[in-house]
Image (cartoon, rainbow, N blue to C red):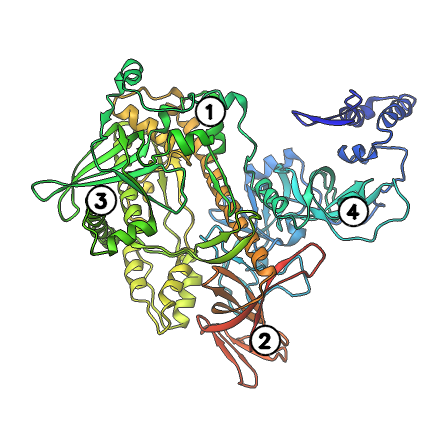
Amino acid sequence: MIEMTEPLEWRVNGISTILELRKYCCLRTIMTTEERPARMVLLLRQTLGKPELLDLVARSDAMDVDVEDLRPNKKAVVYGEHKVMSEITAGLHNGRFHQGKLRVNRYNPFEAYVGSESVGEEILIHGRQDMNRAFDGDVVAVELLPQSSWVGSEVGKIADRDDEEEEEQVGLVPASADDAPREFKLEDGKKAAGRPTGRVVGIIKRNWRQYCGSIEPMKMPGGSGGTVQALFVSADRRIPKIRIQTRQIANLIDKRIMVSVDSWEPTSRYPNGHYVRTIGDIGDRATESDVLLIENDINSRPFSEAVLACLPPLPWSFSEEEHLKNHAHLKREDLRHIRIFSVDPPGCRDIDDALHCTPLPDGRFEVGVHIADVTNFVLPNLPLDVEASQRGTSVYMVERRIDMLPKPLTEDICSLRADVERLAFSCIWIMSSEAEIESVRFTKSVIKSCAALSYAEAQARMDDSRMMDGLTTDLRNMNRLAKIMRLRRIERGALTLASPEVKFEIDTETHDPLDVGMYQVREANMMVEEFMLAANMSVAGKILKEFPSCSLLRRHPEPTPQMFEPLLRTAAAVGVNLDISTSKALADSLDLAVGDDPYFNKLIRILATRCMTQAVYFCSGELSYPEYLHYGLAAPLYTHFTSPIRRYADVVVHRLLSAALGLSSLPEQLRDMPHLTSLSDNLNYRHRNAQMAGRASVELHTVIFFKKRPTDEEARIVKIRSNGFIVFIPKFGIEGPVYLVGKEAKGSSGSSNDGMWEVDDEHQIIRSTDGSRTFKVLNTVRIRIEVVEPQPNRQKLQLTLIM
């Protein structure tokens, strides 16, 4: 019988055979020739009847197991030899080589970038040859090519329909420049001016991990039990195919499996690896969702007993006697008499914010944002806190939520549900009737929400003139103040960008998608957002004043002019002039970008969004004050305070604020700038991965939805290519390539290939050579959306022009 223990250790009849096999591989070089066969025979006898266990052994060219030797024959060198570390070190010192982390283009696995401080900008790496066996995330040494060989990305053509590995995919619209395909303006369609291009000459630090995917379809061998070679295709397109040896090919061919990389020799086109475990059946929704979680390094395991032991006993309720006995130093303010309410998405159970808006006799307002006091229950350095810090954030998939904290906290003890007493951390302002903040105070509190409204319910109350109750009046007052605050932010230069959010209706039994459409944003949504932003800004100022070198803040770097180039080219092609000199100038020019299409302005804003990098957490001591700026919000200071149930950054900020108010001492590690820097790096990593997993879940369910429902829908052209164009489908928030029938076009430079289409790149137009059809960027076209299977087990969305 085989059983798995923690950590990964397979046992056969109590003998750790795999560990012994791996030990054999390591010790082989120091064994005598006489010792090797006897030791190996013993190990093979232990695996008798379980040949699949041999798949778990890391591959080694030195293993002379008594099976058919399937090692590749000696070949010509495919890749260059990596430089030894001493040569790399010397080259880095004398400026010949440049160090950085290699990032493979998510949209083109044959293009990568290495951020290098010594060069001052990203170094472009073109093709597998120059990537030289480097994986995404590896720290590499790069040598610049001669400047005559510096080339730009070939953005003029959609990848060949027949080259599956290079073909562009249909997916969600990129949410930022971090997600969008890289583009560089080409001169005469040939070379990018001054774009540093290089090749990898050595690996400084490997980033190999376990990869999810499937076996490439292959002809099944005759017989049984023999070792065969197979190619593993990762679910992550950035990862090259991996060659594995297996004795259980029949059991793996239709499965999602996990594989580890062992080596990549310069004589081999593919890296060598070995099978780790089976995840489930290809095409099964639960299996595919598990793959997304694993690929994005999301911890979805149940919370441990040690973590759960940190929770207070259930049912929990607020006890004044217990509070006065154990927490009198917190000076918790009793706000249970105030009319407090929450406004959230429908069905929300983890309610971490609530609001109040009380008119004062002199015409001013007391406005409060009340946030779940998570740190009252998540104490520093206990197992619950350590687990939350490692998870970093909750992850929202289409069909489920993976919590940062256990459900008894997120949905009960901390959740600010209606008609129950809950602990909060409150930010309370006195505001003028024109939404000017006259004063702000922060306090630990106990509240009792009178209503947990959905956005639709809150909006319905505000819109119904017949409703004049106190709660509805509070909502209207708050909404009026929020509109003034929003306009004031925009006047300061805050950007009103757009990103299409997709909402699914899910079958409660099968969890399959029943319907899909764009998420509707109401005034109620924007009202809540405005006061959350204000609370975050107020808290940022308070904690930075008290802890200038160790505050956890959030910044949004200003985009470079180069990042705006795709947007400016598209806008110019349709007669729109955008001013990118400042965020205020951009905001004003976006407001003026209008056309006959009612969706025109939103589309321009979506294209602007993808020019921005994502906002990031940082330690205040790392940077100078001007670098703290949040560009998108036009805010000199910003942090996250309002969602501690689902973001660990907010937990840290709550501790900073509590210490700043003298309510508690600041944990020692939060005073340590290197620790806080490391923590912020992990939070950025976890936040990014959670976003990617959520987007991948939407894309998976979009494929499931359209598999049974081929659909015709309107789309907008967002980019012209030489053999087609890229379209955006507003109703479903997806983007992808549409191929035009016929040969590739001839470019506006005049280089002809006798194509059926010709491209005017400057004006972003593609027209048929006979003049019968013309397509221009931002034009509306009708598209058929359907699911195809170009290769076994590789379903994908395909967009086809309806002529």
In space, the residues marked 3 and 1 are separated at their CA atoms by 37 Å
Residue 384 disc label? 1
Amino acid type, callout 4: Ala
In space, the residues marked 3 and 2 are separated at their CA atoms by 62 Å
Amino acid type, callout 3: Leu
At x 23%, y 40%, the residue is 356
Farthest right residue in view: 34
Instruction: Give 627 or 479, whichever is nearer the viewer.
Output: 479
Q: Is residue 433 above or below residue 783?
A: above
Q: Quadrant of the N terminus?
A: top right
Residue 230 disc label? 4
Residue 471 disc label? 3
Farthest front residue in view: 466
Residue 745 disc label? 2
Specify which label sits upstream in the sequence, 4 or 3.
Answer: 4
Instruction: Give 558 or 717, whichever is nearer the viewer.
Output: 717
* Drawn side of residue 471 relative to residue 25, left or right: left
